[in-house]
Image (cartoon, rainbow, N blue to C red):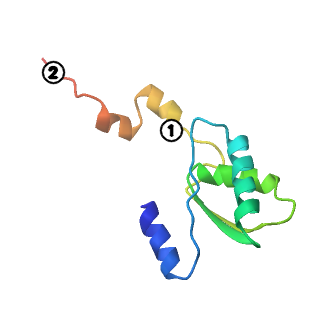
Amino acid sequence: MYLKLKLALECAGFDVRFHAYDWRQNVLSLGKELMQRLRAESNGPVSVVHIAPGGLVARAAMVRDRERQIARLIMLGTPNYGSFAAVLALRGAYPPVHKIAPSRSRA
């Protein structure tokens, strides 16, 4: 999915680069890391496209963006108001859990 989006944006003339998301780190430190990378690698204002929790990382980067390097932020599927996925997974009510859980045989 990400590669198709990257290729489509490149075909439209954009310079596209991935930024890794490490779910084991907190969002604020990841945002700091993203902002440091943007300062080091870009020559001017950039548009940032992030998917899912990556949007939270981009928002954390924007807090540090005093030079207004991020001109536009596009978030796709970002849980800006939180997510119930973890609660549903723990309760066993999350559909992906049903797909990977072993089926119980009925006697």
Residue assigned mark 1: 85
Q: Which quadrant, please, contains the N terminus?
A: bottom left
Expressed as whole percent of the image width and height from the top left, the position of residue 71 reads 75, 70
Q: Residues within 10 Å of mark 2 (few under 14, many from 20)?
A: few
Expressed as whole percent of the image width and height from the top left, the position of residue 69 reads 78, 66
Say what amino acid the circle numbered 2 marks: Arg
How many numbered tags mark residues here?
A: 2
* Rendering quarter of residue 70: bottom right
Q: Work out whether residue 16 or residue 93 is closer to the camera in this orientation and state it.
A: 16
Q: Which quadrant, please, contains the C terminus?
A: top left
Q: Residues within 10 Å of mark 1 (few under 14, many from 20)?
A: few
Q: Work out whether residue 33 or residue 91 is closer to the camera in this orientation and state it.
A: 33
Furthest residue to the left?
107
The image shows residue 50, relative to residue 10, as above or below, that is above
Furthest residue to the top?
107
Q: Work out whether residue 102 or residue 6 is closer to the camera in this orientation and state it.
A: 6
Q: Secondary structure at mark 1?
A: helix
Furthest residue to the right?
66
In front: label 1 or label 2: 1
Left or right? Give the position of 36 relative to 3: right
User: At 72% across and 68% down in the image, what residue appears?
Assistant: 42
The image shows residue 103, relative to residue 70, as above or below, that is above
Say what amino acid the circle numbered 1 marks: Ala
Left or right? Give the position of 59 relative to 91: right
User: Which circle's residue, 1 or 2, is located before the other in the chain?
Assistant: 1
The circle on residue 29 is none
User: At 70% across and 57% down in the image, what residue appears?
Assistant: 37
The image shows residue 83, relative to residue 69, as above or below, that is above
User: At 59% across and 74% down in the image, what residue appears?
Assistant: 15
Residue assigned mark 2: 106
* Rendering quarter of residue 72: bottom right
